[in-house]
Image: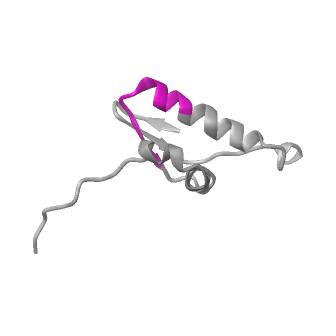
């Protein structure tokens, strides 16, 4: 996880193989995203496939996902 003033980038989530399938990754995701929500002023950029998929399965966290403003660049 990389952090800036307003944006947190989730780059990779890893769970030891002997803990896979036991909900450990989900607890990590929920804890980290709840921490972002509690702060109230930051967004997340989920580059990590696990975190991205977790957010898709838990739409109540979609509001935390960073939305880039549309570009006004013209050729």
Where's residue 22, x and y in %?
84, 44
Q: Is residue 49 left or right of residue 41?
A: right
Judged from this view, the residue extending furthest toward the top is 39
Residue visible at 59% across and 49% down in the picture: 58
Where's residue 1, x and y in %?
53, 39
> Does residue 2 lie above or below 68 as drawn?
above
Where's residue 63, x and y in %?
42, 44
Judge whether residue 10 can be spotted in this image.
no
Residue visible at 65% across and 45% down in the picture: 13
Judged from this view, the residue extending furthest toward the right is 18
Where's residue 11, x and y in %?
54, 48
In the picture, residue 42 is in which quadrant?
Answer: top left
Whether the magenta-drawn stretch holds residue 39 is answered as yes
Towards the viewer: 28 or 34: 34
Q: Which residues are magenta?
A: 34-45
Residue visible at 62% across and 31% down in the picture: 31
In the picture, residue 14 is in which quadrant?
Answer: top right
Judged from this view, the residue extending furthest toward the front is 60
Residue visible at 58% across and 33% down in the picture: 32
């Amino acid at each position: 996880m990389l952090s800036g003033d307003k944006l947190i980038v989730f780059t990779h989530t890893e769970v030891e193989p002997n803990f896979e399938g036991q909900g450990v990754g989900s607890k990590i995701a929920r804890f980290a995203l709840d921490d972002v929500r509690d702060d109230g002023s930051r967004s997340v950029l989920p580059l990590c496939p696990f975190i991205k998929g977790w957010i898709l399965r838990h739409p109540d966290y979609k509001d935390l996902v960073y939305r880039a403003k549309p570009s006004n660049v013209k050729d």
